[in-house]
Amino acid sequence: MALSKTDYEMLAEFRYALRQFGAFSEAEAKKLGLTARQHQALLAIRGFPGRESLTIGELAARLRIQPNSAVGLVNRLAAEELVARETDAGDRRQVFVTLTPKGLALLEQLSSAHRGELRRVGPRLRELLQSLEG
């Protein structure tokens, strides 16, 4: 099925809105001394389904990065005392990453700002999504 000019306009507008939200997110993280990827990592840890921690491999998968890059990211977050590593008692090769109270406090600040921004831009994003479904 061929796309119309309106379809392309809606797709372009949706991508533009996503980039704007991404820029907002990056700026908010920077205000707190974090990179966008560090913020994404904190959120991935806290938001992992069913657990309060995840493995390096799970973090890498959630962020779509290589495991060695996830190790470096966790090392930097640990140096800032934002995350802690815990070795699995049953399998000492398995290391879980959890947020520290400091990491959780930063994530709460960022998440509050993001929720506010999503409330602001959400109606437009919903409108664009609905137009793309049709």
Image (cartoon, rainbow, N blue to C red):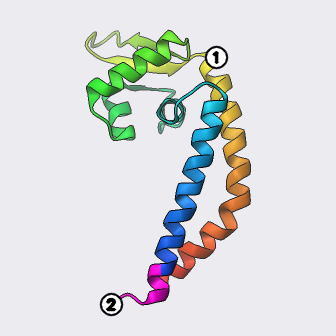
The residue beneath circle 1 is 102
| Quadrant where the image shows the N terminus | bottom left
Q: Cα distance, mark 1 to mark 2?
A: 51 Å
SS category of the residue bearing label 1:
helix
Residue 35 visible in the displayed image = yes
Q: Position of residue 16 (x, y in %)?
A: 53, 64
Residue 101: x, y in percent? 64, 16
Q: Quadrant of residue 8?
A: bottom left
**Are the residues at dot 1 and dot 2 in contact (C-beta closer than 8 Å)?**
no
Q: Element under label 2? A: loop
**Residue depth check, mark 1 versus mark 2: number of the one nearer the observer:** 2
**Mark 2: which amino acid?**
Ala
Q: Position of residue 109 (x, y in %)?
A: 71, 32
Residue numbers of the magenta segment:
2-8
Is residue 132 at all visible to an observer of this figure?
A: no
Q: Is residue 65 left or right of residue 105?
A: left
Q: Amino acid at mark 1?
A: Lys
Q: Residue at x 27, y 13 (%)?
A: 91
- Give the crowd class for mark 2: few <14, some 14-19, many >=20 residues within 10 Å: few
Taking the magenta stretch, the answer to whether it contains residue 123 is: no
> Residue 17: where, in percent of width, then height?
57, 62
Query: Residue at position x 55%, y 81% from top?
Result: 131
Q: Magenta segment: does it hold 5?
A: yes
Residue that label 2 marks:
2
